[in-house]
Image (spheres, rainbow, N blue to C red):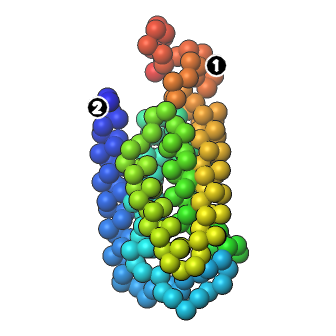
Amino acid sequence: MSERVRAAERGALWAALGAGLAAWGGFAAIPPMRVRVGREVVDAWVPAHYQAAAFPAFGAILYLVGRGFREGDGLWGGRAALLGASCAVAVTRLLGAHPLSGHAVFLAAVCAHELAARRRSPVLLGAAALGLAITGAYKAEWGDGVWGAVSAGVGAVLGAASWRVGRSGAGAKVEGECQSIDGTARGLPWYGGSEW
């Protein structure tokens, strides 16, 4: 593992820890929300640690998208697409527009995206897997296991699709591909050019 990759993982770890702690503190300081099972609001309260369960992965992916964009790492495009689509699902869920779980969609999407990538972030994958386990346990406790599973399935499809976007879209010079986005071999060790 190169020093650049180790530095990115350290940054992702700090971003995950910071976002998780900030979210936990923030959600603990405000009145809790009611639990939604599908579209129905039930007589149960969402604990702060459940709300915060998605934020370590959220902080890590935000950090990695920003760093990847700045450094020209092609993984940023797919991760940014995943982030945008899953945030839209979460916000519309809060508005009661659909029964999908924003937590399960986002966390399963991150897991699928990172598992599909040759160069995955262990910090991001670990944070998402832990958050997804917490989400699944609460969904089962609240009797929302079916919608939790459907949401995770939608998230897995979203994660795989965003990985494809990242491979073919913005900065596709990564993933061990033999060509950069403009079709040349720039950036490969045996290419004599100095563009990268």
Residue under the image location 53 percent in, 74 percent down? 140
Q: Which mark is residue 3?
A: 2
Q: Would residue 100 appear left or right of 33 to someone viewing this image?
A: right
Residue 41 position (above or below residue 149): below
Q: In which quarter of the image is residue 161?
A: top right
What kind of element bears circle 2? helix
Q: Would residue 119 appear left or right of 144 to someone viewing this image?
A: left
Q: Which mark is residue 45?
A: none
- Residue identifier under label 1: 183
What kind of element bears circle 1? loop
Residue under the image location 48 percent in, 19 percent down? 187
Residue 184 position (above or below residue 81): above
Residue 132 position (above or below residue 64): below
Amino acid type at circle 2 is Glu
Residue 101 visible to an observer of this rendering: no
Distance (Cα) linking label 1 and label 2: 28 Å
Measuring from the top left, give residue 115's x and y in whole percent: 51, 42
Q: Which of 142 and 125 is in front in this view?
A: 142
Q: Would residue 148 appear left or right of 7 to someone viewing this image?
A: right
Q: Nearer the viewer, residue 57 or 67?
A: 57
Residue under the image location 30 percent in, 39 percent down? 7
Q: Residues within 10 Å of mark 1 (few under 14, many from 20)?
A: few
Amino acid type at circle 1 is Gly
Q: Would residue 60 appear left or right of 158 to someone viewing this image?
A: left
Measuring from the top left, give residue 188's x and y in whole percent: 48, 16
Q: Which of marks 1 and 2 is nearer the N terminus?
A: 2
Residue 154 position (above or below residue 21): above
Taking the view exactly as shown, the residue that stands out farthest to the bottom is 43
Image quarter of the N terminus: top left
Measuring from the top left, give residue 151's x and y in whole percent: 62, 63
